[in-house]
Image (cartoon, grey):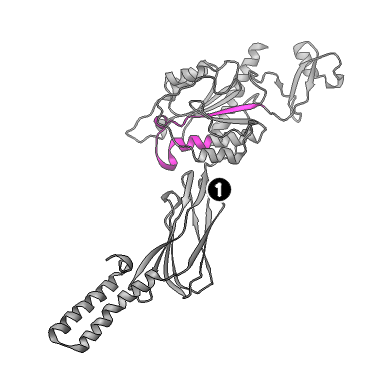
């Protein structure tokens, strides 16, 4: 059956079949009363279908999501405002909103009675388990008559965007000497002792205020040194995120790629709040977050860019130059082979600060799927002057970052000792 009769329910079809059977029996038995009953039984579901199919019910809906941006593991509340402007009261409504499986099950609501010009508010929560740009909707309504003889589907609302950003965990500390500029390893940053601020010193110049003489550095270097007033760091730090599909293991929220994205987001926000200008790039040097023109990105821009990031099918790391442009570089890497390590260190000046978090993807792999050993890559990077740390899923991200800062500080102190 097509047209309005297409919405006839099983109950309506059974009633229609019973009416046709009664009409056939009335013709065979020549029973006029039975014929009248059969006409009524046949007409009832047909008229109901035509009436509901062509009537203007006048349903309207608005969807609101609060908040419109939420992290993985967070919660967002969705409110649906439903009202009717039709001439007749509306009842027997079954509403179902379209929700991706990564946000939870599809909510359903039954509205027994919706008076004219009076609205109701429906609410449900979504608990995102995967980052991404998700769309809620469309909202579909199943309209039925009071007898249950006909039903029709109506689309009441379109789609609403929900941005699920990666989870950013709080971090503590900075890599030793971080924030001193390109090629500066932190050996000029001196700790003045407990309770005193860190000092940056330079040789004395004619006309300098003698009150700014740093006597400890003067005694250590045997020449007059003055303290430079330290200002908020406005240098640049590049975070390289390896998002090659072949470099990661696992699937869903527990995949190594999701851990790497979350770690990159945590480091970016942490350094950004300490005054660093952050550049977020992929393993081929392409920028992940759009540039605002002055090199400054807000946390929202960084997180939204990471939320939309998808894995790439590129097999190897390929760089046309130094991804850090001579400044501090922090790389979050999946499984890398010696050729990929060569790409990372080829254009990277040894005097520039370089740090790497190597994911032991074997810990994320299934039992029958062995991953690459990160020890070889770690050895090659350390030989090129990088500070490295191996990360595993059971290690909390703050601990990984603290260990990386400690390794970087030890390497800087070792270099400083060699120069002294």
> Which residue is located at x 51 percent, y 28 percent?
286
Q: Residue at x 86, y 16 (%)?
A: 207
Q: Residue at x 47, y 55 (%)?
A: 158
Query: In the depicted view, which residue is nearer to us: 37 or 213?
Result: 37
Residue 396 appearing in the image: no
**As rendered, which of 91 and 317 lies closer to the eye?**
91
Q: Can residue 44 be seen by looking at this rendering?
A: yes
Vertical position of residue 192 compared to residue 207: above or below: below
SS at badge 1: strand
Give the percent coordinates (x, y) of residue 237. Answer: 61, 27
Please provide percent x and percent y for residue 218: 79, 15
Magenta stretch holds residue 237: yes
Which stretch appears magenta?
235-263
Q: Nearer the viewer, residue 50 or 77?
A: 50
The local crowd at label 1, few if under 14, some if 14 to 19, many if 20 or more residues have their Cα within 10 Å, is some
Residue 371: percent from left, percent from top:
38, 29
Q: Quadrant of residue 198?
A: top right
Relative horizontal placement of residue 183, taking residue 48 as reference (left or right): right
Above/below status of 96 relative to 10: above
Residue that badge 1 annotates: 69
């Amino acid at each position: 059956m097509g047209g309005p009769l297409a919405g006839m329910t099983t109950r309506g079809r059974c009633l229609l079949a019973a009416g046709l059977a009664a009409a056939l029996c009335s013709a065979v038995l020549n029973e006029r009363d039975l014929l009248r009953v059969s006409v009524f039984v046949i007409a009832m579901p047909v008229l109901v279908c035509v009436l509901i199919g062509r009537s203007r019910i006048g349903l309207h809906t608005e969807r609101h999501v609060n908040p419109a941006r939420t992290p993985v593991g967070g919660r967002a509340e969705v409110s649906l405002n439903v009202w009717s402007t039709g001439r007749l009261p509306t009842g027997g409504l079954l509403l179902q909103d379209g929700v991706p499986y990564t946000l939870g099950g599809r909510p359903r609501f039954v509205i027994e009675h919706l008076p004219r010009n009076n609205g109701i508010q429906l609410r449900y929560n979504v608990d995102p388990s995967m980052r991404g740009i998700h769309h809620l909707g469309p909202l579909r309504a199943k309209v039925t008559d009071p007898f249950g003889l006909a039903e029709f589907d109506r689309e009441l609302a379109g789609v609403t965007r929900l941005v699920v950003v990666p989870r950013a965990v709080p971090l503590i500390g900075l890599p030793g000497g971080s924030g001193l500029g390109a090629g500066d390893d932190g050996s000029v940053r001196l700790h003045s002792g407990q309770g005193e601020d860190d000092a940056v010193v330079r040789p004395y110049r004619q006309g300098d205020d003698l009150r700014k003489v740093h006597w400890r550095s003067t005694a250590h270097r045997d020449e007059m040194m003055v303290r430079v007033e330290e200002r908020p760091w406005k240098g640049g730090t590049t975070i390289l995120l390896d998002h090659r599909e072949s470099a990661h293991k696992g699937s869903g929220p527990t995949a190594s790629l999701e851990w790497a994205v979350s770690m990159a987001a945590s480091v970016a926000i942490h350094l950004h709040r300490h005054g660093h200008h952050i550049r977020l790039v992929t393993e081929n040097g392409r920028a992940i977050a759009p540039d605002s023109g002055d090199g400054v990105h807000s946390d929202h821009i960084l997180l939204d860019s990471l939320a939309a990031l998808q894995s790439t099918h590129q097999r190897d790391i390929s760089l046309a130059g130094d991804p850090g442009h001579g400044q501090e570089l922090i790389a979050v890497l999946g499984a890398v082979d010696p050729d990929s390590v060569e790409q990372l260190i080829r254009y990277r000046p040894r005097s520039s600060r370089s740090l790497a978090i190597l994911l032991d993807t074997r810990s994320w792999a299934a039992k029958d799927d062995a991953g690459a050993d990160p020890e070889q890559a770690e050895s090659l990077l350390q030989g090129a002057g990088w500070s490295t740390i191996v990360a595993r899923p059971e290690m909390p991200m703050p601990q990984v970052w603290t260990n990386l800062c400690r390794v970087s500080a030890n390497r800087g102190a070792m270099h400083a000792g060699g120069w002294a």
